[in-house]
Amino acid sequence: MPHAATAAEADAAAPGGEPVGPLERGLAVLRALAAHPGPRMRPGDLVRATGLARSTVDRIVTTLTHLGYLRIEDDRDVLLAPRLMELGNAYLTCCGLPDALEPLAVALADELDESVSLAVPDGAGVRFISQSTRRRTMALAFQIGDLLPAERCAPGALFASGWSPEQQADWRTRLHDDPRDTGFPAVPPRSAPPAPDEVESAFRQRVADARAAGWAADDQLIEPGLVAVAVPVHAPDGSTVCALSVVSHTSRHSARSLAEHALPRLREYGARMEAALASPAPVAAPPAPGGPDTSRAAKAELGPEFLQSLTRGLSVLTALGSAPGGLTLSGAAEATGLARATARRALLSLQQLGYAAPAGEGRRFTLLPTVLELGYARLSRLSFAEIAQPHLARLVEQVHDSASVAVLADDDIMYVARVHTVRIMSVNITVGTRFPAYATSMGRVLLAGLPEREAAGRLARASVRPLTPFTRIDAADLVDAVAQARRDGHALVDQELEEGLRSIAVPVRDRTGRVVAAVNVSTHASRGTLDDVRQAVLPALTAAAAAIEEDLAVVTERVRLAIP
């Protein structure tokens, strides 16, 4: 990557000269956070990792937090936020490969009952863009966005056949500078690495074998017990655009038996993928024109702490992902609402920084897989509870009562995330606690999210009993309560689970609109009337649910997330 320009250099840079300084420095901060072994960093850590001034780091963090790409905890800790996955999602849409090929990869995984991956070359490395995994005790730890050393995986031997002299030189330099592969968090570092010359010689032989055979194998190169077989997938012009891999464990296959088991199907599905890429894709409609440049309002609100150039550069990056194949300069300007000169400067900066490139003869710009280095793999590993937890914490700060998230588990609700207050309450609730759905606000919201007949069936078979003198136990009454929650969009339960305990809940929906969880606030019955609870809590509760839904939609756009 080019060095970070000073503010004076950035201001003086003409389009086509040095990259836009704030954009370059902002991306450097995101890379530092993504590469850090822990989930959070202090501003001082970012100063040391990037070489930037503390005042510059503070302005970048302020800007990226305003955009929702970072969040601050405990007043100082800086963390990547799920919304940052917008950038990686933009690349995955722009390249078009997951949309075109992932259905075939899923079908192959089902047919072979093994994990299947799609990977693309990224410099002298290999980056995953699709994973169709099997649920087993020993499962793959790799995520979309992870980068692997080329010499330690099957796709690398396929991609290296087409390396340019510059890529070969970069690979050799990396091999000597990082023999333990510590720069690849997705793979275990080598405890006793062989000499770089030995690694180079062995890899060259694997590349030659793969070129001759048309496929490559990984016999526990990444880690003991893991084996893989890969075939190339070619574009209509004959170039290798990605690799299709089947991955297994030595408890199921050796490298040889996996090849015997999977190679015929791999070749068949590879050919089908090539046919899919050769078929004329529907011409994507141009993106809707963007509204006014929203960075102006943020600049007016936050003043000098807000970096307008960084915001505009990232908006251009995400705009390139609005359709497969990227956008022209005019398309990027129109999609972002930016002046053509501003969009051009951002595009050329992204190109120089290695995140975008001109494509084809249509003067389009397309994103490169390096965009995925901006925290995509780390954020792909977030659980549903981890996505919800910071929003619960913010909700508790607002309402000063405990908040929770739960899912349906048979006829019960099960808590999957919770933030307590210091108030003393007699209900001891922890993650994993279960309560009958019929007597809880979250249960009624979750039942309301089901088809009416299914919800009525669950209530009919539930073991209903009075938990307090206030518990509603009449079957018709409970059906009416669920129907009321469906109409109102929330449920309020007053002392039906425990005397003195009052709870209000709203649904959490996935990107398809399906209710997958509920979020609630619990309070003591002595703290006002039911209307007081609605007025004091429901707006903040609804906003928290919406924030969880927004993060969930971004995370699950390309990543399969298991919700308990």
Image (spheres, grey):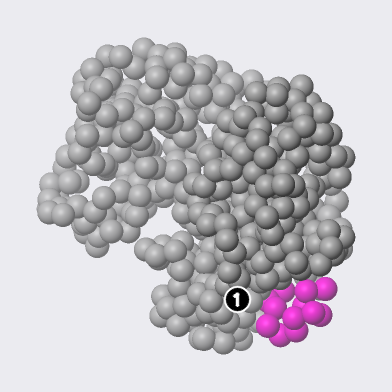
Task: Please tell me in which quadrant of the rendered image residue 520 appears.
Answer: bottom right
Residue 10's spot in the image, x, y percent? 62, 79
Residue position for label 1: 60
What residue is rendered at 52% in x and 86% in y?
54
Q: Residue furthest front?
A: 469
The answer to whether residue 506 is visible is no
Amino acid carrying mark 1 in the image: Ile
What residue is rendered at 28% in x and 19% in y?
259
> Which segment did they paint magenta?
297-316
132 w.r.t. 331: above or below:
above
Task: Please tell me in which quadrant of the rendered image residue 427 appears.
Answer: bottom right
The answer to whether residue 432 is visible is yes
Residue 141's spot in the image, x, y percent? 37, 42
Nearer to the camera, 15 or 377: 377
190 w.r.t. 444: above or below:
below
Q: Are there few (<14), some (14-19), or many (20+) residues within 10 Å of tag 1?
A: many
- Does residue 304 appear to the left or right of 113 in the view shown? right
Question: Which element is circle 1 on?
Answer: helix
